[in-house]
Amino acid sequence: MPGPSTELVQQLYRTPPDRFVAARDAAVADARRAGDPSTARQLARLRRPTVAAWLVNLLAIRRPELVADLVELADELRTAQRELRGPRLRELSAQRRAVVGALVAEVRKLAAAEPDAPPAGRLPLAEVEATLNAAFSDAEVAEQVRAGRLLRAASYAGFGEVPRPQLRLVTGDDEEPEEERPARRPGAQRARPESATRTDRAAPGTDRAASRKDRAAERAEQAERAAQRAARAERARQRRALDRELALAQADQKRVEAELTEATGQERDGVAVLDGIEAELAELERRRAVAEQDLSRAKLARRAAERAVTVARRRAGEVEGAIEALAAEEGDADGGAGAAD
């Protein structure tokens, strides 16, 4: 079965050291439950990093592009050291100090964003700086830093990866190897005049000095050409970095401009809907006023009709009473006439 995924290993090495063992053991248990003993064994072999190593791993995992720049500059610096390019070495050393300072500041920010990180005053930033400087001198350390799986801080006490005996050529104080001196025959020194002896001793030294000067001049010329090539490479690297930043900025600009256009259209549509609703509300208010007026007139007409009905009913009652009274009088009159007959 395949081993642990890169994402899982990075997740473990992102974990603060005081929680690393618990997280690793939980991952081992998950692998065993999943029936993957090979992955479980590989996970169990992972070791807890120190706090300084964890901070460097956090930088490599969170900001891999910064670590890639460090490794690229380290390669250039080691090349310049091997070729003894003095001016370029000074230039790259200044760049190294700037890069290391920026990376240490970035580590401080990344640690501040981690909830379980040590307080800022207890961060081993000196060990982080020493590890980053060691990456400039040791390709193996640089690769460990790039992988984000460092277990402990690293340091380098020397200057570059070039052995010091090779650097002594520029001092002009070296002596030729003993075997290169001409062998003396017994009695030969006594047979030569003193002036010839002095000449013989001076001639090899003069030749060696001239040879050293020639080699130094050749190395200086090579260093100058290499410095020019490195400067062009650095400018090209910076141009590529700026091109990447420009592409990202332009993509962000297009995205936010599209969002602005969409938001403007939504705002315009919302204003149109609101205007329509307000127009409908105004029409409803007008119709309500008309309806209220019609209702008032209807109420007035009803009240007038009620009064008229009351008057009519009263008048009808009065007429009915008059008719009944008249009928009674007529009955009385008819009764009296019959009795007279």
Image (cartoon, rainbow, N blue to C red):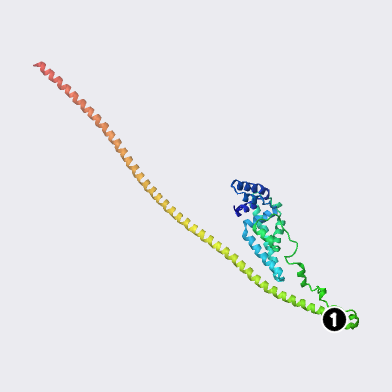
Q: Which of 55 and 29 is in front in this view?
A: 29
Tag 1 residue: 200
**Residue 303 lies in quadrant:** top left
Q: Where is residue 218 in the image (x, y as percent from the top left)?
A: 72, 76
The percent position of residue 126, horizontal first and vertical second, equals 72, 57
**40 lies left or right of 263:** right
312 relative to 232, above or below: above
Kind of residue at disc 1:
Asp
Q: Which residue is drawn at 62% across and 69% down?
A: 235
Q: Is residue 261 visible?
A: yes
Secondary structure found at label 1: helix
When the figure is inspected, residue 130 is found, relative to residue 310, above or below; the finding is below
Instruction: Locate residue 59: give its quadrant.
Output: bottom right
Which residue is located at x 71 percent, y 69 percent? Answer: 82
Give the residue furthest to the left. Answer: 341
Residue 193 lies left or right of residue 98; in this view the side is right
Q: In this view, does 307 lie to the left or right of 323?
A: right
- Residue 76 at what x, y percent from top left? 67, 67
